[in-house]
Image: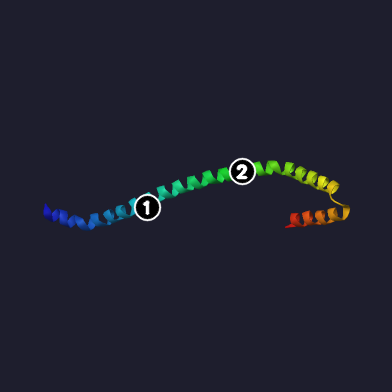
Amino acid sequence: MDSELISMIPIILPFAGLIALIIPLIGMIVRLSERVKALETHLDIIRKDLDVVEDALPYIEILKENFVNVAGQLLPRDGLDDFIRLVNKREHQ
């Protein structure tokens, strides 16, 4: 019986080696899938935040125009031209 077990060692060893390699790979795949799920969650949060910002852009534009109009009423005319140039310069950057 011992000789039968010894003769089976060359047959069993490659399978045992494959199993020893496959088990850590499965663990690594599980960890990577957890990280992917976490990244998808973060991406969903970023998308929602981006949607909120995009929805707010028209209101921000209105606020900017109102600010420029009020500043135009408060500043002397030559100061307003400089201010408008400064605002336009910042928009292009």
Name the side, left or right, on which 92 lies relative to 81. Answer: left
Classify the position of the C terminus by image quarter. bottom right
Q: How many other residues sit within 10 Å of disc 1, few (<14), some (14-19) or many (≥20)?
A: few
Residue drawn where x is 75% and y is 54% of the image: 91
- Residue 22 at x, y percent in the picture: 34, 52
- Position of residue 44 relative to residue 3, above or below, is above
Residue drawn where x is 65% and y is 41% of the image: 52
Disc 2 residue type?
Answer: Asp
Most extreme residue toward the left is 1
Residue drawn where x is 49% and y is 45% of the image: 38
As measured in the structure, the alpha-carbon distance from the residue carrying label 1 to the one carrying label 2 is: 36 Å
Q: Which residue is mark 2?
A: 49
Most extreme residue toward the right is 77
Secondary structure under tag 2 reads helix
Q: How many other residues sit within 10 Å of disc 2, few (<14), some (14-19) or many (≥20)?
A: few
Image quadrant assignment for residue 3: bottom left
Q: Which residue is mark 1?
A: 25
Image quadrant assignment for residue 55: top right
Query: Foreground: 71 or 8?
Result: 71
Residue drawn where x is 24% and y is 56% of the image: 13
Disc 1 residue type?
Answer: Leu
Query: Foreground: 20 or 76?
Result: 76
- Residue 26 at x, y percent in the picture: 37, 49
N-term mark: 1 or 2: 1
- Residue 17 at x, y percent in the picture: 28, 56
Query: Residue 60, labelled with which disc?
Result: none
Q: Are marks 1 and 2 in contact (CB under 8 Å)?
A: no
Name the side, left or right, on which 78 lies relative to 62. Answer: right
Secondary structure under tag 1 reads helix
- Residue 7 at x, y percent in the picture: 17, 57
- Numbered disc in front, either 1 or 2: 2
